[in-house]
Amino acid sequence: MTSPQCGLPSAGEKMKEMKVPFVDLSRQYQAIFHEVQDAMAKVLTRCDFILGEDVSLFESEFAQYCQAAHCVGVSSGTAAIKLALLACGIQKGDEVITVPNTWFSTVQVIYDVGATIKFVDINPQTYTMDVNALAGAITKKTKAVIPVHLFGRPVDMEPLLELAKKYNLKVIEDACQAHGALYKNRRVGSLGDVGCFSFYPGKNLGCYGDGGAITTNNDELAEKIRLLRNYGQQSKNVHVIKGFNERLDTLHAAILRVKLRYLDGWNKQRREHAQKYNELLPKSVVTPVDEDLIESVYHLYVVRSSARDKLARHLSAAGISCGIHYPTPIHLQQAYADLRIPAGSYPVSEQYAHQILSLPMFAELTDLEIEQVCTAVREFGS
Ligand SMILES: *Cc1c(COP(=O)(O)O)cnc(C)c1O
């Protein structure tokens, strides 16, 4: 009912009209814009745009945050995984194993370095690599494995690292969705040979464009990646290997240094939101399972429903924006038709692609918004 005096909707109507965004980056910016603008102004004044002061400062701060010896800033998460593969010596004829339910580029970079793409299915409980299936996929040609800490949840790394040791495989963590996540009290990115991070704007730690980083405890790999990102240049005009232009911009590093100070707080808020969703959502949807010794940072909060598409339409009509991560497993993408992997090869990934729904999740999400989402899911029924 509209109040006759001012034409504003009543509380009830307002509630109904309130839209819940999937992610709202402007709320974060509102909270930190003074600091971000100061940090950017300093770079603009110094004009050290390429490999400037803030890049090396961010690298040491992020390495420390990840409990890793080194961090090398690069131009994107995709570049991070590509340079990690190259630094590990992965090349034509080598097989690299990952999962089919990931962002496209985890797989694309295996192709980019000329290696052979191999998949294993996911664990139905955790939605991440089925480490038991991994053993059966390793051949004499397998040289590396890319576990993906999908949705911010660490892969079960201990058995994976044991297998990797046994078969002499490099472990390249795709931690692009998992900044700050803990596995047995260790940060992801410090567990395998190399950790790869994306600072795409919507990630838990994001810059205002493309950016990425690799972390490692291996001095040689760090040095190699430092060269690879900067045309293989050891010093001015001295190119010791063939390399790329895949550097992290100083402006982004400056922004990331501001945001890194907030990351733990934001991740804590995400975990609290997940807890609230877990409590309030009806049994008609399957909610994520938390485990002892694993601390997810909930980049995404993903539920499963056998009526996913209808549920998504219902939520959309209620003003709630959702996502699907990801609707097509990579082996079924048209781009990879040449792999000739038939449908049915990875049944859990394929079945889940039809059932998963990512609900609104970002640090600044309010309790009221979470309640609105849960009410709408409850109204939908099963
Ligand atoms: C975002 C993402 C990437 C790629 O990162 P970009 O910075 O967008 O290149 C790779 N893997 C996963 C799992 C991601 O979520």
Image (cartoon, helix red, strand yellow):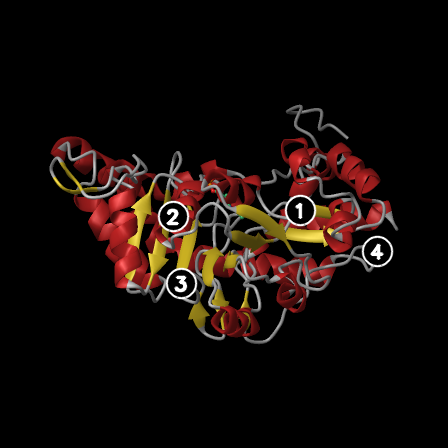
Residues marked 2 and 4 touching at CB (< 8 Å) = no
Between circles 2 and 3, the one closer to the viewer is 2
Q: What kind of residue is marked 1?
A: Leu
Residue 353 position, x and y percent, is 74, 46
For marks 4 and 1 on the same chain, the one whose residue lies earlier in the sequence: 4
Residue under label 3: 193
* Quarter location, residue 147: bottom right
For marks 3 and 4 on the same chain, the one whose residue lies earlier in the sequence: 3
* Quarter location, residue 376: top right
Residue under label 2: 86
The residues bearing labels 3 and 1 have C-alpha atoms spaced at a distance of: 33 Å
Residue under label 4: 284
How busy is the neighbourhood of tag 4: few (under 14 within 10 Å), some, or many (20 plus)? some
Identify the secondary structure beneath mark 4. loop
* As drawn, 256 above or below 159: above
Front-most of residues 201 and 4? 201
The residues bearing labels 4 and 1 have C-alpha atoms spaced at a distance of: 15 Å
The residues bearing labels 2 and 3 have C-alpha atoms spaced at a distance of: 13 Å
Residue under label 1: 359
Identify the secondary structure beneath mark 3. loop
